[in-house]
Amino acid sequence: MLTIAVLMFVLATMHIAVNYTRVIKAFIIFPNEPGGPGAFFNELSEFTQIFGSTIYVAQTLVGDSVVLLRAYLVWGKRFYVVAFPCLLLFGSSIAGGGILYSFAKVEPQAEIFVVELSHWIVSFFSMTLATNIICTGLVAYRIWYINRRSISFSEQSLRPIMLLVIESGAIYSATLTALLILYKTQSWFQYVLLDAISAIVGLVFSMVIVRIGLGLTSVSGESGEFGKVSTFRTAGPGGSKFGIESHSDKTLGEFTVDNRSGSPTTRSDSYNPSHNGSDSGKVSV
């Protein structure tokens, strides 16, 4: 997860750097070119335009892959559960490649809303939106289901974790929906969201890890102190292991769910003085 977080940070930083480069070229280097800065920004085949779009497509595909991986792990590595989102991710990859190819081949004076680009762009936005909504729903439902089955013998609730997953997914979904609407209505304001969404992808991915790692979200739904945070863990292809731990040297609850029956089988509420908090901040959702 750390590698993915660093990759997203690098991609988002590169996207911002490309945007600054385009601003400098439009207003400082080529301000007196025919059509002015507006003509420069509207030139779809210009190198910085294609390079920035490539970074955005890559960032989106990485983010969608992470959401899909979370759903896959939470559902006990059952591929059939995420088969359709995998097809959507594959379709998004093809649509992203189509966008970049169309940018390179489109007429120099063509606008972003031309038919040659519209089909690819709408397909890309729609499939990545569907992937995010479906995978977030799968993760949230799985957590809700396990929480409902275990609430009879566990003092802790996974509901705050479920809400955190839904919140992070809702932010990205709302942004994508707004972007899709703006593009379909041929509003130039879509460029504002398009430049911001690359950073939003990384923020949404990091939100779960950061909020739980810093104690901003706990199993009780309240803020906690750093070093006394709670984590939610899953592990094992044969059974999904869900643990709720407090890193003040006490295990609050842990149970294993058989992937075939969906029933909790074991639980531990014992004091563990040897626990040193080495898993602090690890969240596999």
Image (tube, rainbow, N blue to C red):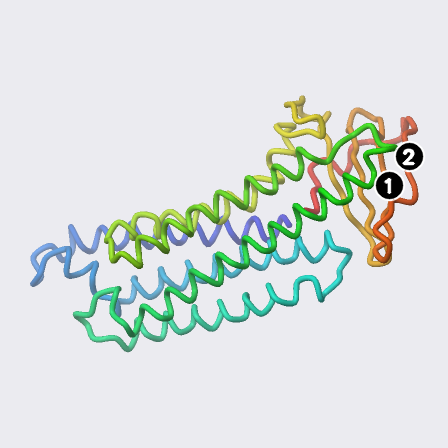
Q: Is residue 215 shown above or below 187?
A: above
- 71 left or right, relative to 273: left
**Residue 175 location in percent, x, y?**
42, 47
**Residue 278 location in percent, x, y?**
78, 37
- Residue pointed to by mark 2: 268
Q: Residues within 10 Å of mark 2 (few under 14, many from 20)?
A: few
- Residue pointed to by mark 1: 255
Dot 1 lies on which element?
A: strand
Mark 2: which amino acid? Ser
- 245 left or right, relative to 138: right
Of the image marks 2 and 1, the number of the one nearer the N terminus: 1
For the point 72% across and 65% down, the residue is 79
For the point 34% across and 53% down, the residue is 181
The image quadrant that residue 277 belongs to is: top right
Question: Contact, CB < 8 Å: mark 2 with mark 1?
Answer: yes
- 18 left or right, relative to 218: left
**Residue 258 location in percent, x, y?**
87, 52
Q: Is residue 103 shown above or below 52?
A: below
**Residue 268 location in percent, x, y?**
91, 34
Mark 1: which amino acid? Phe
The image quadrant that residue 123 belongs to is: bottom left
